[in-house]
Structure formats: C-alpha cells, structure tokens
Amino acid sequence: MTPPDDSIAPAASMIVLQGWGEGAKVLMGQRAAGAAFMPSKFVFPGGRVDAGDHGADLPDLLAPACHTSLQRHPVGGPISPRILVAAGLRELAEETGLTLLQPRADALRFFFRAITPPGRPRRFDARFFLARAQDFVGDHAGFSAASGELSHLQWLDVAAARSLDLPFITRVILAELQASLTEGDGAAAGGVPFFDNSGPQPAFLRL
C-alpha cells in the first residue's frame, strides 16, 4: 500500500552481518528498475509496517536501551518496538528467505533511523536493525526461498558495498557501520544516529 499524500509510514530494515570486524560482510540486494521508491538502488532488506505486524507473536529481541531509543521522537504517533521488529523480520524473510533461528533478548540492535525527505514518491520513518547472519536459518548462499523483490542478493564487505549504486542514506549508514566495525562501538554510547526530515528543516540527532 502507498501512504496517502505526503504522509510518513513506519518502516524497518535489517542490516545482517556475516562475521564482525574489518572482515565482516553485509547482506544487500537491488531494487527493481520499475520500483516507485529507490528504483535500481542497492539496499538492505526491509519495508513498511503492515497490518499483520501489529499482531505478531514475538519474544523480546532487543536490549532495554534499544527500546528506549526506539520510542524517542515519535512521528505520527508512537509505535511499539515489537511491531517494528516484526516488520523487519517479516521483510527479511520475504526478500531473502532467511528466518530467525533462536530468539534471544539481544538478537537485534537498533542501529540507525532516517525519515525520507519531503517531495519523494514515498516517505518512511525507517528504523534499521543490526543482526548477525549466524542467528538466521535458510539458504545463505543462493537465497532460494526469496520472493524476488530484491535481485542480486549478496554478501559484500562494507567497503565494496559502499561502491554500489546506493541511496544517500544507505551510504551514510554503511559509513557508520564501517566505523563501528573497525573502531569499536564507542559511537553507540552517544546514541543512535537519526536523520530527521519530518519538519521544515532537516536535523541530525542522536537518540
């Protein structure tokens, strides 16, 4: 479904990593050339929250600090972190065929948030969750159960991923990810990065 007019729809994406540190690889795929939103761009698996995500029966997969950050600066009304997690996992399963193997309270980490600027054909308040490939089952090589919504699904080292045809915000997230992988998680202590384009002036915050 398309959000009406210039409304901002909640969305969630999954940044799935194989390994950690400088040798880590990130999962990305390419959107269709005819897509209304970000055609032909390489992105992380993800998409908007659907009605079914509100009733998803999920255990808690986030640390308390992530819950707190996810509920700061609500746009268009508050939304439960559990709903956002459900949307991210559902989109990952649909677009890659990968599903969570063993739920645990720290399986996901809230890593980034961005609101699409005005004037785009779709606008989303997107939360990006960091996850490890080892926590997911499925065809990690051929993605044989994927829906086909994303093509050229592949694991790439972060530097190689940054050379692809990317949306601006994906490029920013990969830079943040590369810093986190090579320099440690010191930046995380300062809060989750948030590109807020909900108002008349864009703002960069930390949640």
Image (cartoon, rainbow, N blue to C red):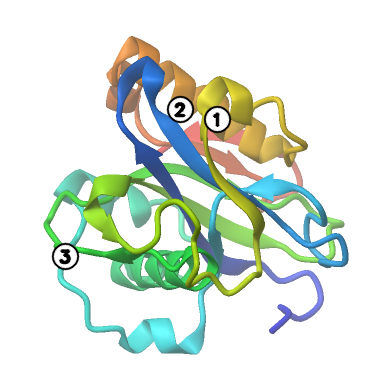
Return the x and y of residue 18 as percentages of the image width and height. Answer: 35, 37
- Residue closer to the observer: 129 or 3: 129
Identify the residue at horizontal 36%, vertical 72% (top origin).
86
Q: Is residue 81 above or below residue 200?
A: below
Residue receiving disc 2:
177
Residue receiving disc 3:
60
The nearer-to-camera label among 1 and 3 is 1
Give the Cα distance between marks 3 and 2: 24 Å
Amino acid marked by disc 1: Leu
- Residue closer to the observer: 7 or 13: 13
Amino acid marked by disc 2: Leu
- Please report contact status of discs 1 and 3: CB closer than 8 Å, yes or no: no
- Residue closer to the observer: 14 or 11: 14
- Please report contact status of discs 1 and 2: CB closer than 8 Å, yes or no: yes
- Along the horizontal axis of the image, is 34 left or right of 132? right
Query: Dot 3 surroundings within 10 Å: few (below 14), some, or many (20 or more)?
Result: some
Identify the residue at horizontal 73%, vertical 38% (top origin).
166
Give the Cα distance between marks 1 and 2: 5 Å
Return the x and y of residue 169 as percentages of the image width and height. Answer: 66, 38
